[in-house]
Amino acid sequence: MLRPAQTDDAPAILALRDALARWHLSRGIRQWTPGQVPLAEIQAQIADGQWHVLDDRDGIEATVRVLDDDPLFWPDAEGDDAGYIHGLMVARSRAGEGLGGRVLAFAEGMIRSRGWAAARLDCVASNADLRSYYEGRGYVFQGIREFPPEIGRVPAALFEKPLD
């Protein structure tokens, strides 16, 4: 299904993220901002083995990042028995096919294979649809992560799912 991303996938990952950021903004959701993430950051994350992608003849259709820690969103979680999911994206052309759930299950499988007992993720706190989506897949709301103004991030809803 998904494969580890390669360095030359970075521009397509960034393009997907920026396209989804524009789509969110068109719906009044301030999740991401186009141009917010530099290409070099994605390239470094790929080099660290964080990104996985699903592609076909039309390019990258879905992505996910799996991390062993996430101090920005979960600053008090050092030593917890959890892995972290970020960058779950599905091209709008594939919306409604259940691909997001399959990518999420893939990430959970990776976390389980690393020996972690739980998967954690976040989304913008004001996105009720996405929060409901995660809750419908077994994620339990853990609270809101506020950020200092200088970080420039909106409040995030934190979720956790036990991986039995």
Image (cartoon, rainbow, N blue to C red):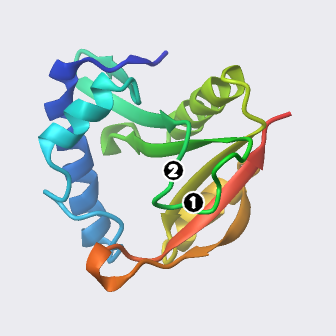
Q: Disc 1 to disc 2, how far (Cα)?
A: 6 Å
> In the current view of this chain or complex, which residue is farthest to the bottom?
149
Q: Quadrant of the C terminus?
A: top right
Residue closer to the observer: 54 or 155: 155
Residue under circle 1? Answer: 74
Residue 145, quarter of the rendered image: bottom right
Residue 127 x/y as whole percent: 49, 72
**What amino acid is found at the position of numbered circle 2 in the picture?**
Asp
- Where disc 1 sits, the SS reads loop
- Direction from residue 127 to residue 10 in the image, left or right: left
> Are dots 1 and 2 in contact, CB under 8 Å?
yes
Residue 151, placed above or below residue 102: below
> In the current view of this chain or complex, which residue is farthest to the right?
164
- Direction from residue 161 to residue 1 in the image, left or right: left
Residue 121 x/y as whole percent: 57, 52
- Where disc 2 sits, the SS reads loop
Residue 112 x/y as whole percent: 71, 27
The residue drawn where x is 14% and y is 48% is 38
Residue 125 x/y as whole percent: 52, 74
**What amino acid is found at the position of numbered circle 1 in the picture?**
Trp
The residue drawn where x is 32% and y is 21% is 5
Mark 2 Cα shell of 10 Å, populated few (<14), some (14-19), many (≥20): some
The residue drawn where x is 54% and y is 59% is 122
Mark 1 Cα shell of 10 Å, populated few (<14), some (14-19), many (≥20): some
Residue under circle 2? Answer: 70
The residue drawn where x is 55% and y is 67% is 129
Residue 148, placed above or below residue 74: below
Residue closer to the observer: 54 or 67: 67
- Direction from residue 163 to residue 119 in the image, left or right: left
Q: Which dot marks residue 109?
A: none
Residue 146, placed above or below residue 33: below
